Image (spheres, helix red, strand yellow):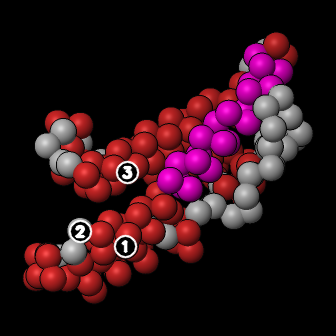
Amino acid sequence: MAWPLIANGIPTHTSTSLHRAIQLAVKRANVLRVPALFEERQAAVLTGAGSSLAGTFRTFVLLATRGWRLLGADVEQIEHGSPTAARFARANVALYIESVYDAHFSLAQIGKKLLVDYKNQGGPTAFGSSLTQAEVNSLAATYSEAQDRLYPHTAVKLGS
């Protein structure tokens, strides 16, 4: 996994394993898709809690995809670009590292929000068999800090 290799910034000397790990992360991020229900057009008809969850999921996809793509481009510049391009890439890489971290943090919040919103909307009594407590619990476990938050936490600062 690429995250532990870049959580504290791009190492002074990049390696083949770092390059491969980031390429794999970029490839995986490129296949992320927003579920049809959460796409902009469909989400426009969602109200309340559903609208918020759709926005959070779309944010995850956008930040993760772009963040990894830009990290990959930065590593390319650091490895093969001019000295000026490499300095610029290194000076700005924290933005992309933070965007990947923020994407996963957002994804990890969906489960918490879902549990609260389900309860506030009437829970099993209101939803019946269309959305059971067990299904909500399963979704909350899938979109949780334990599953989606990145470790170690990012420690980079802009310009590092």
Q: Which residues are magenta?
A: 85-106
Of labels 3 and 1, the one closer to you: 1
Q: Is residue 53 magenta?
A: no
Q: Which mark is residue 115?
A: 1
Where is residue 76? Give x, y as percent: 68, 30
Q: Quadrant of residue 85?
A: top right
**Apparent side of residue 49 relative to residue 9 in the rendered image (left or right):** left
In the image, what residue type sits under mark 2?
Gln
Tag 1 or tag 3, which sits nearer the N-term? Answer: 3
- The residue at the point 43 percent across, 43 percent down is 59
Q: Nearer the viewer, residue 29 or 44?
A: 44
In the image, what residue type sits under mark 1?
Leu
- The residue at the point 86 percent across, 34 percent down is 160
Q: Is residue 94 magenta?
A: yes
Q: Quadrant of residue 82?
A: top right
- Residue 5 in sight here: yes
Tag 3 or tag 2, which sits nearer the N-term? Answer: 3
**Apparent side of residue 146 relative to residue 137 in the rendered image (left or right):** right
